[in-house]
Amino acid sequence: MEYRHVLDPDRKEKICRCILLALPAWFGDLKAIRQYARGVREQFFLCAVENEEPVGFLAVQEHTDVACEITVMGVLPACHRQGIGRRLIELCVRSYRARGYRYLTVKTLADTADSSSYVKTRAFYLACGFEPLEIFETLWNAENPCLFLCKPLFEAQGDSEQDF
C-alpha cells in the first residue's frame, strides 16, 4: 500500500467521487457526493493507493492557524478493517503537527440518530484518539444530528499546580 499527497484538483475530485459512490451506507445522497467532490479540490488530500488504484482518501480543510478539520474520508468496502483509514489519519496528524497545528477535528453523525454504519464510524474515530466534544442537533438537519470530535495534536504536558 502506498500513501500519496495528491495535488491535482481534478484527480482529488475524481478519487473522492469514485470512493464515496462505493459507500452508499455512509454517502447515499448523490447531491452530497457532488458537494464533497467539489469541496476537496482546494483541500489537503491524502490517498491510499494499491496497484495504482485509489482505495481510500482523506481531505482536510484548514480553518485557523491552529485547527483543521477532516471534511471527508472514505475507504473502499473491500479494504475496510485493514488499517488504511488509521494510517491516513496518522499521516495527516504527522503533517499538521509538523506545521504547528494543535487540533484536528471531524464531524460525523451523532449516536442519537439510528445508523449501524455510523456506529462503526464513531468507534473508528474514538480508536484514533478523537474525543467527542459536542452534539449539534440541527447543524445539518433534525434527522442528522452532528457529533463534533477533536484530536489534540500536541503532546500533553504534565499538570502543574498553581496557586489561585
Image (tube, grey):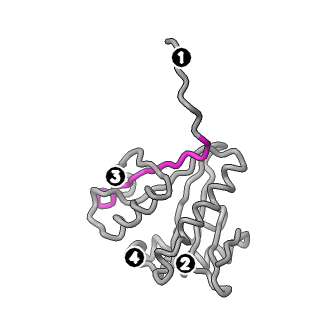
User: Disc 2 marks which residue?
Assistant: 17
Marks 4 and 2: in contact by CB < 8 Å?
no
Of the residues under marks 3 and 2, which one precedes in the sequence? 2
Density class for disc 3 (Cα within 10 Å; few <14, some 14-19, many ≥20) is few
Region of the chain picked out in magenta, as a range: 141-155
Residue 120 vertical position relative to residue 138 in the rendered view, above or below: below
Residue at x 62%, y 55% (from the top left corner): 93
Residue at x 44%, y 77% (from the top left corner): 30
Comparing 138 with 64, the one in front is 64
Horizontal and vertical percent position of residue 119: 34, 64
Residue 129 vertical position relative to residue 43 in the rendered view, above or below: above
User: Disc 4 marks which residue?
Assistant: 28
Provide the secondary structure element on which disc 2 rests.
helix
Disc number at residue 9? none
Residue 23, image quadrant: bottom left
Of the residues under marks 4 and 3, which one precedes in the sequence? 4
Q: Quadrant of the N terminus?
A: bottom right
The span from disc 2 to disc 4 (Cα, nearest Å) is 12 Å
**Which amino acid, mark 3?**
Thr
Comparing 105 with 89, the one in front is 89
Q: Is residue 92 left or right of residue 115?
A: right
The span from disc 1 to disc 3 (Cα, nearest Å) is 40 Å
Q: Nearer the viewer, mark 4 or mark 1?
A: 1
**Which amino acid, mark 4?**
Gly
Residue 102 vertical position relative to residue 55 in the rendered view, above or below: above
Horizontal and vertical percent position of residue 96: 67, 52
Density class for disc 2 (Cα within 10 Å; few <14, some 14-19, many ≥20) is some
Disc number at residue 162? 1
User: Disc 3 marks which residue?
Assistant: 138
Comparing 21 with 39, the one in front is 21
**Which amino acid, mark 2?**
Arg
Task: Examine the structure image and report whether residue 143 is included in the region drawn in magenta.
Answer: yes
